[in-house]
Amino acid sequence: MSNISQEDYLTAIYRNLDEAGEIKPNILASKLDISNAAVTDMLRKLSRDGFVDYQKYKSVRLTNEGELYAKNMLRRHRLWEVFLNQTLGMPWDKIHDEAEKLEHSSSDELINRLEKFLKYPSIDPHGYPIPDKNGKIKKTKSVKAITEFNINDHLIVIRVNDDVKNLISYITKIGITLGKKILIKDKLEYDSSIILMIGNKEINISYKIASNIFAEKIKR
Amino acid sequence: MSNISQEDYLTAIYRNLDEAGEIKPNILASKLDISNAAVTDMLRKLSRDGFVDYQKYKSVRLTNEGELYAKNMLRRHRLWEVFLNQTLGMPWDKIHDEAEKLEHSSSDELINRLEKFLKYPSIDPHGYPIPDKNGKIKKTKSVKAITEFNINDHLIVIRVNDDVKNLISYITKIGITLGKKILIKDKLEYDSSIILMIGNKEINISYKIASNIFAEKIKR
DNA sequence: TTTAATTTTTAAGCGTGCTTAAATCTATGG
DNA sequence: CCATAGATTTAAGCACGCTTAAAAATTAAA
C-alpha cells in the first residue's frame, strides 16, 4: 500500500508520460515542484514497492500495478470533482485543489458508492474521462488543443487542463467553460499567441495557455 | 495551522476531558494508542502553537483556539458521517473510520456546503450533536448511559459511542440501532453486567459496553 | 572527440512523529 | 515522612520526505 506522497508521484507520473510511456526525473520534479534529489529518493522507494520500473540515470515507467494505482487515483479525483461541482455547487476553479485532498482519503468502497450516487458520470467538470472501477477509460474521440486548429475555425470547448496552477481561474475569468463556443480569429506568428472570439469579446491568449484548452470543430 | 496528527490529538483531548476540563497525558496516550513519550513530544508542539495549555508533569487543557479547532473537527467528522450513511448508504459500522480520514481533508467551505446539502442535520448517525460553523453545540437533554437506569426501565437508544474500536460492529450485531426500544431486564451484582431485552431476545452485555450506549426512559 | 552544460545521484542535514529504555518526578500508602 | 509504584520526561534511534551542496554520469555542442 501507498501513502499520500507516493500517490501524488504515481498520479504525476501517469499524467505526464511522454509518447514512449516514460518520464524523466527532472520533469517529474518540476511537475511536483520539488528537488531532483527528492525524486531520486522516492523513485527508489516506488521501485522497491513495485509501482515503477526504474534504473539509475534512466527515465521511469509505471509497472502494471503502478498504472492501475494511478488510474484509480484519477478516478477518485474526478469523481470527487463531479460531486463538489455538481452536488455541492462549488465553483469550477476550487474543485481541483479540494479533490486533491479528498482523493487520498477515500476507500474504494466509498468511491464506488459515490459513483453510483452521481449516476456513473463519464467525464469530470474539466472534461476528463472517469476510469471505471477496473481502471478502464472510455476512449474519447480525438481531443485537440486549440493551438492545432486554424484561423476561422469555430470550436466548442470540451476539456481544460485542471492540473496547471491558476489556469482554471484565469480561463473562467475570460469566459471559457465546458461547452463554450469560440472562434479562432487569428494566430500571431510573433509569439504564437492566439486571438479568440468568446461571445462578442476578442481575447488574446498565449500559446502556453491555449495548449491547455481542448476543443472540437463545429459547423457554423 | 495544524496537520493530521495534531488534529487527532486535539479531537482526542476534547472528547476525553475530565470533569475539570483536563486530561492526563497517559490517558491521552492510551486513547490514541501511542506511547507516553510521543504524547509529551506532541504536547510541547501543541502548546508552542497555542492549542493547549501545558506544563511539565501536569494535565493538559485546551486553549480557546484549541477548543474551537477540536469542535470544528467534530463538525467535519459528524457531517461526513451523515453524508456517508444517509446519502451514500454506507453501513453504520463503517462510517466512523471513513469519516476519520475525510475530516482531515476538507476545507471549511466544503463542509459548509455539505451541511447545506444535508439540510443542516442536528445529530450524526451515532446520535452525537453536530456543532455549527461557529462551534456552537445545541444543548441536548441529559444523556445517560444505560448503566444508570434501573431494572424494568423501558428505554429508547439515543446515542452510541462511535469512538471505541469495534463497538459499533458489536452493537449492530446484537440488534441495537438509534431509536431502538430496549428493556433493562436485570443488573448483575457480580460483574455489573446488564441483561437487556432487545425485541424478544435476552442479551447480556458487559458494564463496559453498556456504558457506551446512551438512552432515555420511555413510558411503556 | 573533447569540452561544456545538463541531469542525476550521493551526502549531510532537518522537522515530524513515532519507538524503547533509562532517568526523574509525583502521588500514595504504610 | 519515606519508600515505592506509577506517571512523565529525556535520550537515542528510526523511517519519511523534503532541502542544499557536491560529486558523478550523461548528453549536447563545438
Image (spheres, coloured by chain):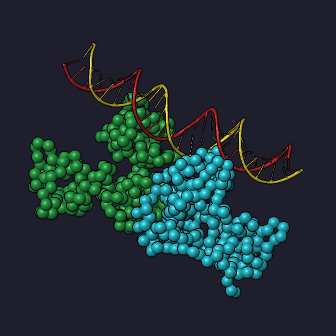
Chain colours: A cyan, B green, C red, D yellow
The percent position of residue A119, horizontal first and vertical second, equals: 45, 74
- Residue A127's place in the image compared with A68, above or below, is below
Q: Which of the 4 image quarters holds residue A92?
A: bottom right
Say left or right for A67 vs B78.
right
Q: Is residue B219 visible?
A: no
Along the line of sight, the residue nearer the viewer: B214 or A152: A152
Identify which residue is drawn at 59% across, 61% down: A14
Tell which residue pokes out farthest to the bottom in this image. Answer: A220
Is residue A152 or residue A136 the one in the foreground? Answer: A136
At x 76%, y 71%, the residue is A194
Percent of width and height locating residue C9: 65, 43
**Image quarter (top left, top right, bottom left or bottom right) of the C terminus of chain B:** bottom left
The picture places residue A147, in percent across and down from the top left corner, at 73, 72
Which residue is drawn at the image coordinates 31% and 53% (left, top)?
A: B162
Horizontal side of D3 relative to A78 (left or right) equals left
* Horizontal and vertical percent position of residue B68: 43, 48
Using the image, determine if residue B41 lies above or below residue B145: above
Q: Is residue A29 above or below residue A74?
A: above
Q: From where the camera sits, is residue A66 visible?
A: yes
Q: How many marks?
A: 0
The one nearer the camera, D18 or B108, is D18
Residue that appears at 76% across and 73% down: A195
Q: Is residue C11 left or right of residue B131?
A: right
